[in-house]
Amino acid sequence: MLARTGAVDSAQAVLSLRGIVKSFPGVRALGGVQLDLYPGQVTALVGENGAGKSTIVKVLTGIYQPDEGQILVDGQAVHFPTAQAAGHSGVTAIHQETVLFDELTVAENIFIGHSPRNRFGLIDRKAMREQAGAILNSIGADLNPMVRLKDLSIASRHLVAIARALSIDARVVIMDEPTAALSHKEIAELYELVEKLKSQGKAILFISHKFDEIFRIADRWTVFRDGQFVGQGMMADVTEAELVRLMVGRSVEQIYPKRPAQIGGPALTVVGYCHPTEFEDINFTLHTGEILGFYGLVGAGRSEVMQALFGITRPSRGACRIGDDVRAIRSTAQAVEAGIVYVPEDRGKQGAVKGLPIFQNVTLPSLTRTSRAGFLRLAEEFALARDYTQRLDLRAASLDQDIALLSGGNQQKVVIAKWLATKPRVIILDEPTKGIDIGSKAAVHDFMSELAGQGLAVIMVSSEIPEVLGMSDRVIVMREGRIAAEFAGDQMTPENLVRAAVGSNGGTI
């Protein structure tokens, strides 16, 4: 049975929240929510973007103070006026994008801000090195504490971020989208680490949009919706369909609403595209009304090909034809002029201009449509932004809001709206639903299908096999910078995609 009251052995919880309220000007982010975290167990916190997950993490880590409600540690009311106070109570967080310092050593990164001191008040580097080594050993990380961070791989840096979070001898570990930038192998290693933390009696709060992760790693679930507590219970007693219904307040019958589209003539033809270091001999044709999926493992070269098509990088040779027009795309301006737009995977750094409001982010590439005689017309900017953000079901207090204040999923919607407002002929979507909750995924997928139905040609790069198979008319699989296989119709199966991606038996079953 689903627990809706929250009465799930709260007396045994390491940390509990009761009636937490947090408001900002014009927005009530949390409306009396509750949460229980238990020793040696993983609690998955799930909800759509804007449900209040990020706000509750900041309350737990002392960044925000609640307007009402209680934080209980071992049943005793506590107050976290600062992040340091939360750390002293044993609460730590591993964020999706932890700030680390390339020029510092592993040990210095782990203990920055709370380095061990000797009796003279100076940093005790010998103790810091030994303690860093002990922490790294406890999580199975074979790293030299004295190596500079810049000399480590991405996966090793992630282990340093985890070690840094654990350096305060945490009892409660918060993992906020920890697998977003990891490969399949690194995700498997993270799962092993979570099991180690559980065996050490840590209480873990795991925040993820990926249901396969939640059902793989979590013991308990808690659902927030629109800043409200909806329910909590044991993972063994809930199904994916029930969690979806609790998250979105409705039944999402079809997450991949691919509509039949009238596929027309060639919209984009790529012949012999090569790059000295990233990809070689790329050939494919994209048709109007078609959604062409690109699948492959991390490092396969998919994003690099798309960036070359958009003029971010230049191919060493090859030709690109848009419709009947042969073009040499040497800049992003030329790509946009030719009708090609690109929604990047890293929306925060490459897709959005933080510090600008939503409406200006949307209209930035379309200023000729919203200006007269060299002067911007505010009403037309708002109208254009409102049209496309409403179609994508953007959740924001106002179009005047700084895009940096939006959740990751809503930032993605703004970036998509920005490029759609240019009325392109070809749109490239690189991991379009990365970090987006299940309800927002359905909205983005529905809009993609609508665009294809209107004759737009769509390239979708995705690492999620259900998304690739659910939304694509054809799928191209890349491996090591080359096209390994192409599938359509009945050949589009998970087994065929994975075999082609890893290079097993020619890729076809």
Image (tube, rainbow, N blue to C red):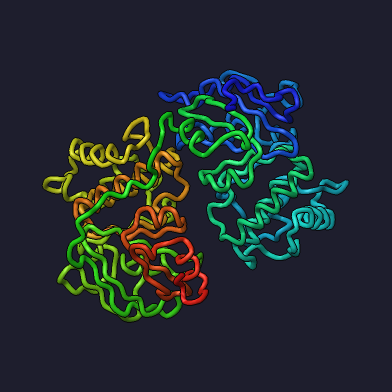
Split into 4 quadrants, where in the image is the N terminus? top right
Question: Please, is residue 201 above or below residue 286 in the view?
Answer: above
Q: Position of residue 13 (x, y in %)?
A: 72, 28
Q: Position of residue 384 (x, y in %)?
A: 21, 41
| Left-right relation of 174 to 272 | right
Q: Where is residue 302 in the image (x, y as percent from the top left)?
A: 41, 67
| Left-right relation of 450 to 463 | left
Task: Please give the name of the residue rendered at 33% of the width and 37% of the height, measured from the top-left corner.
Answer: 393
Q: Nearer the viewer, residue 28 or 492?
A: 492
Question: Please, is residue 80 above or below residue 279 in the view?
Answer: above
Can residue 58 be seen here? The reply is no
The residue positioned farthest toward the right in the image shown: 119
Q: Position of residue 73 (x, y in %)?
A: 73, 27
Question: Please, is residue 429 above or below residue 481 in the view?
Answer: above
Question: Please, is residue 152 above or below residue 211 in the view?
Answer: below
Task: Please give the name of the residue rendered at 36% of the width and 63% of the height, measured from the top-left corner.
Answer: 490
| Left-right relation of 303 to 215 | left
Quadrant of residue 109 within the rendered picture: bottom right
Task: Please give the name of the residue rendered at 54% of the width and 32% of the height, measured from the top-left corner.
Answer: 55
The residue positioned farthest toward the left in the image shown: 373
Can residue 324 be seen here? The reply is yes
